[in-house]
């Protein structure tokens, strides 16, 4: 797979989205793990999966973000365009509206109580969105939200390794007990990667984060 560079993104935009041709393409720092992100002009951002295994996540985001629009007490990226795989780049990619802000880990001062309150309100609101409209958990969520039995083969393979011999019996007991557990309520939506690098804070964050803005939805 071709290295994801600003030059590649410019070429992809010129070919597939000529209405945005000629806009400056600038890498966003710091970059994420699953995707590579580039500013496109002043108001847009391009996200491209960094490996084939992350392609389904991009497609899932483009489907879910419009469903969540206006239903959460935070701003979400607006999907502007979804582009499928091509000869130049063999994975789907997306263009979204740019959201300004700073991730909490890059702020010198932060009201953690206010941050927790805003984040909690957002997570509660997310659970109230009808889950029937969204996708079921699976490969696109890296199995977050799936019953842990999906990892059964991996666990069994690890339990027989010599370096785990001293803890294998106890670990197997814990694993088997976990197999009897599972979510029994109605399906609900939830984020699979609530981390400081996946949210933005704007508007006086040093005194109080008036608005949390999740960068991505999992």
Image (cartoon, rainbow, N blue to C red):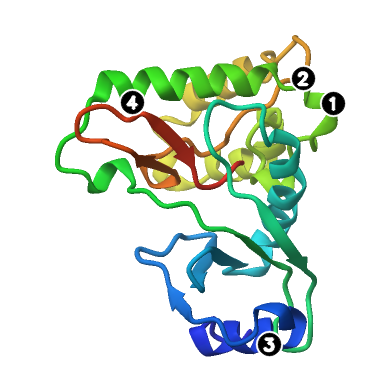
Q: Indicate the secondary structure of the residue bearing disc 1.
A: helix
Name which residue lies at 33% across and 48% down. 102
Q: Within 10 Å of the Cα at label 4, are there few (<14), some (14-19), or many (20+) other Cα atoms?
A: some
Vertical side of 77 occupied by 193: above or below: above
Tag nearer the camera, 3 or 4: 3
- Spatial CA distance of label 4 from label 2 is 27 Å
Tag nearer the camera, 4 or 1: 4
The residue positioned farthest toward the left in the image shown: 108
Precedes in sequence: disc 4 or disc 2: 4
Q: Within 10 Å of the Cα at label 3, are there few (<14), some (14-19), or many (20+) other Cα atoms?
A: some
Q: Are marks 3 and 2 in contact (CB under 8 Å)?
A: no
Instruction: Tell me the residue that label 3 is attached to.
Output: 14
- Spatial CA distance of label 3 from label 1 is 37 Å
Instruction: Tell me the residue that label 1 is attached to.
Output: 132
- Compared across the picture, whether 121 is left or right of 102 comes to right
Tag nearer the camera, 4 or 2: 4
- Compared across the picture, whether 143 is left or right of 85 comes to left
Precedes in sequence: disc 4 or disc 1: 4
Vertical side of 211 occupied by 126: above or below: above
Vertical side of 177 occupied by 133: above or below: below
Q: Count all numbered tags in the image, as a single digit.
A: 4
Q: Are marks 2 and 1 in contact (CB under 8 Å)?
A: yes
Precedes in sequence: disc 3 or disc 4: 3
Q: Indicate the secondary structure of the residue bearing disc 3.
A: helix
Instruction: Tell me the residue that label 2 is attached to.
Output: 187
- Spatial CA distance of label 2 from label 1 is 8 Å
Name which residue lies at 62% across and 28% down. 190
């Amino acid at each position: 797979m071709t290295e994801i560079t600003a030059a590649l993104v410019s070429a992809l935009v010129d070919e597939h989205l000529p209405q945005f041709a000629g806009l400056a393409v600038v890498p966003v720092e710091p970059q994420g793990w699953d995707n590579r992100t580039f500013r496109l002009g002043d108001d847009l951002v391009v996200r491209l999966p960094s490996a084939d295994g992350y392609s389904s996540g991009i497609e899932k985001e483009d489907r879910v973000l419009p469903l969540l629009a206006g239903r959460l007490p935070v701003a979400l990226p607006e999907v502007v365009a979804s582009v499928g795989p091509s000869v130049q780049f063999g994975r789907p990619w997306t263009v979204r509206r740019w959201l300004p802000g700073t991730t909490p880990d890059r702020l010198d001062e932060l009201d953690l109580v206010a941050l927790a309150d805003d984040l909690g309100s957002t997570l509660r609101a997310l659970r109230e969105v009808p889950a029937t409209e969204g996708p079921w958990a699976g490969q696109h969520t890296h199995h977050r939200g799936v019953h842990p039995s999906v990892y059964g083969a991996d666990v069994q393979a690890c339990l027989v390794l010599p370096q785990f011999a001293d803890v294998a019996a106890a670990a197997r007991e814990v694993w088997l007990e976990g197999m009897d557990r599972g979510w029994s309520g109605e399906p609900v939506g939830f984020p699979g990667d609530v981390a400081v690098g996946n949210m933005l804070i704007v508007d006086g964050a040093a005194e109080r984060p008036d608005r949390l803005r999740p960068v991505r939805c999992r």
